Amino acid sequence: MTTASATARQRFIDTFDHYLDATVREAENRERGTVLGLNDYLELRRGNSGVYPGCAMIECILSIDLKPEVFYHPALWNLTRIAGDMLFTANVSPESDRAPCLVPTSLTNDPRIFTVITRNKLAVTQPTTSSPSFS
């Protein structure tokens, strides 16, 4: 049976530690009722989406020993970041338990999270219908 390299194990520990820190920060924000701006929210969700430790875990499971200059190469890191963005933007709705750290509850009856963010940021009032009228 093969095992993960010391580098891969340490990378998993480091990325999982970062994941836990981001998860705690999100819980603290939710507890305080803190509403984050878009950039802060995205950065926090990148940290607690689980994508970074997931990639490190794949490296461990497959017994791949990527050098740090490969794992942290800007192109690979950007792909990992994009994968995380795709994961959490498709997985978060205003009704989810993660929404309170992003938007006030008065704006959470729209299922499109970025519509809600925009309304919150621009202080746009809630429409009376859920679908736009093109007439």
Image (cartoon, grey):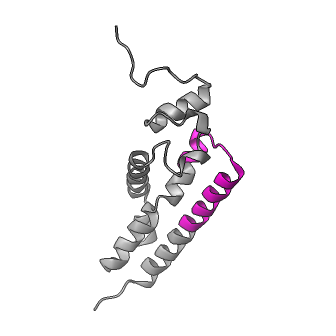
Question: Residue farthest to the right?
Answer: 32
Q: Give the position of the N terminus as an image quadrant.
A: bottom left
Foreground of the two, 49 or 13: 49
Is residue 22 depicted above or below 118 in this figure?
below
Q: Give the position of the C terminus as an image quadrant.
A: top left
Picture mark count: 0
> Residue at (62%, 40%) from the top-left corner?
37
Foreground of the two, 88 or 39: 88
**Residue 109: x %, y % from top left:** 49, 34
Q: Which residues are magenta?
A: 18-42
> Residue at (52%, 59%) from the top-left corner?
48
Q: Is residue 26 magenta?
A: yes
Characterize the magenta stretch by its predominant secondary structure. Answer: helix
Is residue 76 depicted above or below 115 in this figure?
below
Would residue 84 be found to the left or right of residue 120 on screen?
A: left
Foreground of the two, 26 or 79: 26
> Residue at (61%, 56%) from the top-left corner?
26
**Residue 23: x %, y % from top left:** 57, 62
> Residue at (37%, 14%) from the top-left corner?
133
Q: Is residue 41 magenta?
A: yes
Would residue 88 be found to the left or right of residue 134 on screen?
A: right
Viewer can see residue 101: yes
Would residue 116 be found to the left or right of residue 33 on screen?
A: left
- Classify residue 18 by image quadrant: bottom right
Is residue 8 depicted above or below 51 in this figure?
below
Viewer can see residue 72: no
Question: Residue farthest to the top?
Answer: 135
Would residue 25 be found to the left or right of residue 58 on screen?
A: right
**Residue 60: x %, y % from top left:** 37, 78
Question: Residue farthest to the front?
Answer: 128
